[in-house]
Amino acid sequence: MSRRSATSGAEWEGRYGYRRAVRIGDVIAVSGTTAPGPDATAQATAAFRIALAALAELGGTPADVVRTRMFVTDIADAEAVGRAHAQAFGDHPPAATVVEVSALVAPELRVEVELDAVVTGEGAA
């Protein structure tokens, strides 16, 4: 099976040795994704947009996502992040986890998201 990857060009990728997303066969894993913004809603919405764009670059769609993980620095933000999640996945909700963590890579970040997808049918490798 071939291995393909998508990169965001972010400084963290080279420094920490990872890619935004990796596809092997019909499985796509999207790394933890953050985005700046004034609040958890804006950060989550932008992070899902970025993560789903990386997924699309490797041939996946929101309907292919089988699991998401959402990390928040304040569990009080879970409701807002959950609404952004529901909006991102619409009629195809994946299995999901929300957990509170003590901090993310930069102090202004409140939300980080990860996606795992299985691409079947036309987009399958």
Image: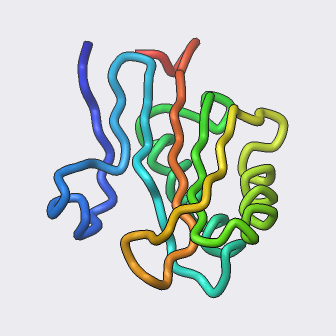
Q: Considering depth in this image, is 96 or 119 the residue closer to the camera?
A: 96
**On screen, 91 above or below 37?**
above
Residue at the spot 51% in from the left edge and 21% down from the top edge: 123
Which residue occupies 70% across, 33% down?
94
Q: Residue at x 16, y 60 (%)?
A: 14
Specify the quadrant that holds the N terminus. Answer: top left
- Above or below — where is 1 with respect to 64? above
Residue 43 placement, left or right of 34:
right
Q: Position of residue 102 (x, y in %)?
A: 49, 69
Q: Residue at x 60, y 64 (%)?
A: 72
Establish if 48 lies above or below 56.
below
40 and 4: which is toward the camera: 40
Left or right: where does residue 17 sit relative to residue 80?
left
* Residue 69 picture quarter: top right
Q: Is residue 85 above or below residue 72?
A: above
Q: Is residue 119 left or right of residue 93?
A: left
Instruction: Name the spot of residue 71 as percent of width and height, x first.
Output: 56, 58
Q: How is the image coloured?
A: rainbow
Furthest residue to the front? 102
Q: Quadrant of residue 87?
A: bottom right
Q: Which image quadrant: the C terminus? A: top left
Front one among 74 and 89? 74
Count of picture labels? 0
Image location (x, y in percent) of residue 105: 37, 71
